[in-house]
Amino acid sequence: MWEKIKVASGIILAAIVAGFLFMPSSKKPDDGKIHLQYWYVSGDKEQIPYHVREFNSSQDSIVVDCTPLPWNEHEKKILTAILSGNPPDVVNLVSPVAKWASRFALVPLDSLMKEDSFDSTIFFPSLWDEMRWRNRIYAVPLYSNSYAFFYNKSLFKEAGLDPNKPPVTWDQVLEYSLKLTKRDVNGRITQIGFIPNYGNLSTAMLMAWELGARFLTNDGTKVDLVNPAMVKALTWVTNFYNVYNFNDVSSFKAGFGFADQQGFISQKVAMMVLDNTFPDQIKIYNPKLKYGVSVIPSFKGYPTASSSGSWWLAIPRGAKHIKAAWQFMKFAVRKQVQLKEAEMEKVILYPANKYAAEDSSFIGNDYTKVIFNKEMEYSHSPTIVPLAHDVFWREFMGASDRAINKIQTPEAALMQAQSVIQQQLNQAIDYDNYVQSRMSLEEPK
């Protein structure tokens, strides 16, 4: 089986090499300007990003031409373009950088950065770390999101809790949740304080990060999902369902939806970890809701933790206008450009440029900005095992479900997941080594 994969891979690699050596010529624009092809994932075919419009109007030698790509087709279209030797000059993606860099699909940016003395410290550290693969930088982060702990002040007051004192530890979350939970005469849950497995972030993963969990060895070859921090975190979550029957909570969650039917906005869930777009969503769907935003709780004596991925910009292998593409990318991550784009977009984009995020004009001047920025400093990348990213999260979530449903102990569920992830990682490493042996990587000149 592996030999067949190698043969197929060799054909793909040969096509890539051929594409690099024999790129088809393209007709030069008759306006005398460099035209950059910019491909980005978007659900809106009509909208041209602000950073494109502003760049085009800021100078008269480079024009960025946009091509929005549908989410379910973007990877295939980009890879096909690279294989054909006619890729775009810049791409805007959200999947792990390592997934692309490890297949020689992106141009390393180190020499361009060195030449311009590019200051990478403008970015939040967790976002910048995602741009690296094998000690080289392949992309720059553009936007992200930030998470914080939201709590309903009105429900706190009704339950006899101080509406100005949110929980700071997970044990307090459990304690408060009991006071905030209501049931009808038939025992059905009508309101609950907290649900660990409701929302975009895994509570168990947040807890594990707070406790100092490391899931991959420094050389990136061994997975350690069954570490003490992860076991403790998943045990806490499973113990939550010793207090609240899992089926009762599941039936309650079945009534949730989007917009005004979202659990926190509809005031059915009193405490949630939510992202920086929720203040605006609350204004739209429940403007009378009285809520507070605080740091994500932790275990006593341990720091908070959060998670934030990144939309990023990169130059595909075979791009025709590398220097011009780099000029555009640098422009897009400028403080003022990111601030203006966040202001103009319908959904608030969290700037990867931390100086933009810290500016007084971003998310107003209230305390929420302070909380969101603090959480960015404690944020962890969701790309935990880069070469087995999708498998990692599939298996981790499966392990969590098995533990919560008492099918397996947390240790046994995590061990099973670790075995599958490690097998996938071993195959990915073998393939990566094979690719590395067949191709050389040159810096742009």
Image (cartoon, rainbow, N blue to C red):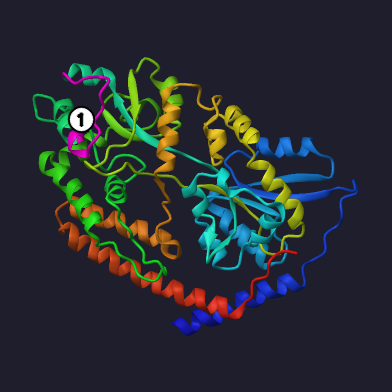
Up-down: is 175 above or below 160?
below
Residue 429 horizontal/vertical position (percent): 45, 73
Identify the element where label 1 is drawn: loop
Q: Residue at left 49%, top 54%?
A: 129
Q: Quadrant of residue 104?
A: bottom right
Residue 172: within the magenta? Answer: yes
Q: Say if residue 47 shows up in the picture.
A: no
Q: Number of callouts in the render?
A: 1
Q: Circle 1 sits on which residue?
A: 192
The quadrant of the picture occupied by the N terminus is bottom left
Residue 430 falls left or right of residue 214: right
Q: Residue at left 66%, top 67%?
A: 83
Q: Amino acid at mark 1?
A: Ile
Q: Quadrant of residue 214?
A: bottom left
Q: Residue at left 25%, top 33%?
A: 168
Up-down: is 344 above or below 51?
above
Up-down: is 77 above or below 12?
above
Residue range highlighted in magenta: 160-173
Residue 258 horizontal/vertical position (percent): 38, 32
Up-down: is 146 above or below 365?
below
Residue 57 falls left or right of residue 434: right
Crowd class of label 1 (few under 14; some 14 to 19; many from 20; radius 10 Å): many
